[in-house]
Image (cartoon, grey):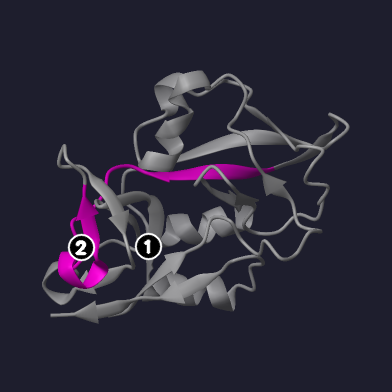
């Protein structure tokens, strides 16, 4: 069984692509929820809106919208593939309207995918997990999965040592590749133990 790290920033070298740098308007202090696997629905605005910033002029839409908020933002087609592979999992799909640089509707086809919770799956030594004085994780050098912890991992999940990252099991990774989705960058992960 193999796993992949899914980039939420997308291809930063392609300046034509949309790059989102803000949470949906109205989330306020609760905007961290979607990046950390915390249930956001109670705080999520009814008519959520995200606006593109002038300093990032890209307007080209892709299957995965790159962003600096650590959100997994995908098109409705990509959402459909994720839903097929993640049936029965606790995941929020939070729709929003994307506005362009001139404050006009650019798309209503996207949502933030928020897998709730996280899994203990890393080999801490091989991953270089570093703890702070208060016992919280301050750094993960690289993601190396522990073979003894991967048997019941879902198709899409977060690692408990770094909840702002998304890990994809190989069956979902293959489905994303064969579907021809754009701006989907997957990095294979080592499994040891």
Q: Which residue is mark 1?
A: 167
Residue at 82% x, 38% y: name it. Answer: 54
Residue at 64% x, 73% y: name it. Answer: 180
Residue 175 is situated, as x and y percent measured from the top left of the image, at: 50, 73
Task: Locate the C terminus by quadrant.
Answer: bottom left
- Does residue 119 belong to the magenta stretch? yes
Near-viewer residue (192 or 1): 192
Magenta residues (range)? 109-131
As measured in the structure, the alpha-carbon distance from the residue carrying label 1 to the one carrying label 2 is 10 Å
The numbered disc on residue 121 is 2
Can residue 151 be seen here? Answer: no
Disc nearer the start of the sequence (1/2):
2
Tell me the quarter of the picture where residue 146 sits. bottom left
- Does residue 169 belong to the magenta stretch? no
Residue at 44% x, 60% y: name it. Answer: 84
Seen in the picture, residue 94 relative to 177 is either above or below; the reply is: above
């Amino acid at each position: 069984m193999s796993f992949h790290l899914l980039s939420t920033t997308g291809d930063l070298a392609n300046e034509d692509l949309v790059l989102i740098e803000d949470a949906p308007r109205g989330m306020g202090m609760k905007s961290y929820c979607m990046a950390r696997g915390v249930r956001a629905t109670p705080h999520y605005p009814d008519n959520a809106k995200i606006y593109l910033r002038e300093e990032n002029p890209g307007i080209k839409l892709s299957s995965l919208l790159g962003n600096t908020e650590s959100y997994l933002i995908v098109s409705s087609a990509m959402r459909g593939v994720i839903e097929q592979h993640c049936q029965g999992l606790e995941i929020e799909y939070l729709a929003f309207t994307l506005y362009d640089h001139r404050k006009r509707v650019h798309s209503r086809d996207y949502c933030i995918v928020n897998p709730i919770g996280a899994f203990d799956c890393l080999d801490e030594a091989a991953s270089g997990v570093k703890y702070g004085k208060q016992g919280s994780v301050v750094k993960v050098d690289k993601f190396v999965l522990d073979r003894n912890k991967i048997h019941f991992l879902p198709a899409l999940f977060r690692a408990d040592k770094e909840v702002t990252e998304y890990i994809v099991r190989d069956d979902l990774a293959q489905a994303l590749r064969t579907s021809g989705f754009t701006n989907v960058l997957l990095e294979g992960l080592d499994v040891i133990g």
